[in-house]
Image (tube, rainbow, N blue to C red):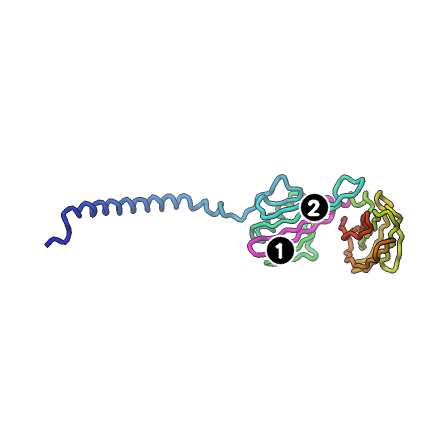
Amino acid sequence: MRTVRPGAQAPARWLALACGLFLLTICMLAASASSWAPHLPRLFSGELTPDPDATLPAPTRYGFRGTHTTTMLGVEAPLRTKLIARIPAELSDVLAFYRTELGKLGWQEQHDGAVVAADRVQLAFVSPLGPAALELVRKDSSTSVHLVQRNQDAATRARVMPRPGLAALMFTNLADKDAVFTIDNRTVTLPARAGKERPEAPLFHLPSGKYAYALKVEGCPDRDTTIELLAGDAWDVTVGPDGDLWSPLQLY
């Protein structure tokens, strides 16, 4: 008794041919992969490319990026420029990128107080315009970037440059009524619209520390709050047109 019909021999021959073609394909793929494999590291390299359109150095690869500048009336150049970004790359690669790119711009890394850890970097620089700082933090699969550059000449021309070893605090009143500020046991009355035009706004030079200050404007509730100052910083506290107290703004 035949268990296989004579016609069943044809599929067997096709099966042998198919197996041969399959093996040939595997060999061709292996040969192709061997020639392509050297390019894999380049495709998945941690190397970051600088973006020529960025105000401050930043790579073309990012998940988020924003640039903020602080300007003053009558001074064209920003007093302070800040870059915030999230880069999908290892912290070590981002650090290498910034050391290279900032070095090209003449930024000098300062070693005093430097922090370089596996998940966090904090470095100070001296740039051609003034002091600068870089902070990197590794979180999840990205590295966050906080880069700040200050412009000493612009701050001097805007009359908000802190004295050596001190912080500067400016009060501005945009309301139509007088505003009374009290800070560090000193009280100053700002006439209506004082500070709208420079250099009318008063400027305090204070040591580093946390300060409580109070505001009184006729027809508005009294307000008490605090501000923390660091030597070398300059801040502005503004009373808005309606007598409301705006959040402090770092100028420099």
Quadrant including the N terminus: bottom left
Residue 238 on image: x %, y %: 81, 50
Q: Which residue is mark 1?
A: 137
Question: Mark 1: which amino acid?
Answer: Val
Residue at the outermost left position: 1
Q: Dot 2: what SS?
A: strand
Q: CA distance from mark 1 to mark 2?
A: 19 Å
Residue 50 appearing in the image: yes
Identity, as a three-letter code, of the amino acid under mark 2:
His
The reply to whether dot 1 and dot 2 touch (C-beta < 8 Å) is no
- Camera-side mark, 1 or 2: 2
Which of the pair 100/237 is nearer the observer?
237
Drawn side of residue 113 relative to residue 34, left or right:
right
**How far across and how far down the image is residue 80, in percent?**
73, 46
Highlighted range, magenta = 129-152
Report the residue at 78% width, 57% height from top: 227
Q: Please tell me the numbered disc located at residue 68.
A: 2
159 falls in the magenta region: no
Q: Residue at x 58, y 43 (%)?
A: 60
Q: Position of residue 162 (x, y in %)?
A: 81, 51
